[in-house]
Image (spheres, rainbow, N blue to C red):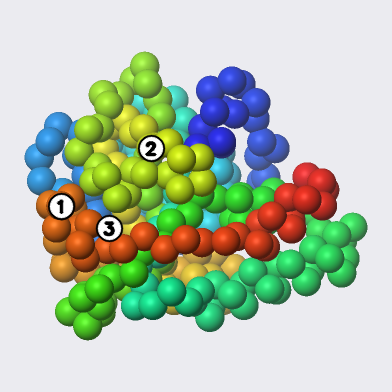
Amino acid sequence: MFASVRSLLGWKEEEPVIQSYPPVTIVGVRIPADGSPAHLLPLTTISDSSAPDSFLLHVPDLRSYWISEQAWRLRDIHRFDLQKDGRVPLSQHLQQTDDLKNLLRQPQRLSREQMLHLRQRHLLPQQRFFAQQHNHYHYCLGAYYVFYSFAVDDLPVNKFVPRWIEENNDAHIPHRYFGDVFIVKISPDEVGQDGRAAYEDVDPLFLDFLVDDAACSKTLIPLLHLREEQKMIGSLNIF
């Protein structure tokens, strides 16, 4: 959300130059802005460093859906996790711990690009949900990123994103989406051996969560998430 406001005001993050990675095709979710049903579809990634998602190193190429180059440039993401309990997943805990250690031990050795990626990763809006029927939805558990555009002059407002996704626990105001909205899933390890985001296919049962808000409110219970690592990083005033 804050990244969106900064972009609209003309405040730009430093854009790192990242290497080009081979494209990967994954199965994600599309929530159309025209009100047609949400559905699974193949998405192919592209290396890009022009938005707050650059820490992933490669992202779904959504330019054909958002049409204009400006709509592609004015994009943002937020994250949500579906869990079987209230614990922080081990992989994410280890990632946060490792990042924090590197930051505290040798901040002067981190490049501006690395610092930017740390900021993007740890200040990203994030929600957590307890999935009550987690045995049935076992393959739906995990971390997801929501990709959306905020190009208000180029795309129609999307009024069909479920309320449990659009609510922003950080800013206490809902996200606003323009054009089609896309959801992709991250593998449990989150990062591959080459350092870029490791995606996995979204399970078809995930579409159950996009149909009925009332039913989802009984199935997905929001968890309060105290982001102590983020608060500590922000308090160091090194960005």
Q: Amino acid at mark 1?
A: Ala
Q: Nearer the viewer, mark 1 or mark 3?
A: 1
Give the structural element (helix, strand or loop) at label 3.
strand
Q: Earlier in the sequence, mark 2 or mark 1?
A: 2
Residue 8 at x, y = what percent? 53, 23
Residue placed under numbered mark 2 in the picture: 174
> Residue 207, image x and y in percent?
16, 59
Q: CA distance from mark 1 to mark 3?
A: 24 Å
Which residue appears at 80% of the width and 63% of the height? 103
The answer to whether 22 is drawn above or below residue 13 in the figure is below
User: In screen coordinates, is 92 left or right of 169?
Assistant: right
Name the amino acid, label 2: Pro
Residue where numbered disc 3 is placed: 28
For badge 3, the amino acid type reads: Gly
Q: Secondary structure at mark 1?
A: helix
Question: Residue at coordinates 22% horizontally, 69% vertically from top-left?
Answer: 203
- Please, is residue 79 above or below residue 137 in the view? above
State whether residue 89 appears in this view.
yes
- Residue that numbered label 1 is attached to: 214
- Could you tell me which residue is drawn at 22 percent across and 57 percent down? 217
In the rendered image, residue 125, in percent from the top left (x then y), is placed at: 50, 49
First along the sequence among labels 1 and 3: 3
Classify residue 232 as left or right of residue 141: right
Give the secondary structure at mark 2. Answer: loop
On the image, the x and y values in percent for residue 152 come to 37, 21
